[in-house]
Image: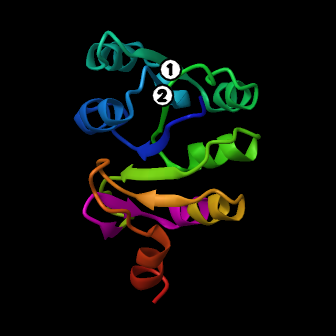
Amino acid sequence: MPILLTRIDDRLIHGQVVVGWAQALKADHIIVVNDEVVGNDMQKFLFRMATPTEINLSIIGVKEAAVKIKNREFDDDRAIILVKSPKDICAVIEAGGKVGEVNIGGMHFSESKIQLYDAIFVDADDVASFKRIKELNVNLEVRMVPTDSRKDIFKAIKEKIEK
């Protein structure tokens, strides 16, 4: 089966993902794609503790993710891919990892960022990555949980940044 969900969420594994998305999609595999987490034993331990035992967890780097997706290594799974940033998923897609639609679920505040939606704050690099993802013919949508209505990230960018 193809990847069920590709999600940008800087918290990676948390309640919205495990309870909301994984249960709704009947996911059996969560794939965290982040080069920093790969090298952080404490974070890996915490993510394993937060993942239900019936769901497999993989924690891999961006390049490895692109190769595994391109080679269709997750096709037998009901997989959710989680990345921290638009830059990470953009790199996966540019390297040939086909992911379908990208869900934007949580990009939190920092001083250099502009708020687009309740939990979506972006800077110029994020916007550039979104635009590149769109150029690569991958749709983007904002939704915190599966029951939320879809929101258009580009409408918010146009209204709040490119006005």
Quadrant for residue 109, please give it. bottom left
**First of labels 2, 1 by sequence position:** 2
The residue to which callout 2 is attached is 32
| Residue 23 image point, x, y percent | 30, 30
The Cα atoms of the two marked residues, 2 and 1, are separated by: 5 Å
Tell me: 4 left or right of 15: right
Tell me: 85 left or right of 128: left
| Residue 41 image point, x, y percent | 41, 13
Quadrant the N terminus occupies: top right
The residue to which callout 1 is attached is 59
Q: Residue at x 48, y 40 (%)?
A: 5
Q: Is residue 126 above or below residue 54?
A: below
Nearest the viewer among 99 and 163 is 99
Dot 1 alpha-carbon crowd within 10 angstroms: few under 14, some 14 to 19, many 20 or more: many
Membership of 123 in magenta stretch: yes
Quadrant the C terminus occupies: bottom left
User: What span is colored magenta in the figure?
Assistant: 115-129
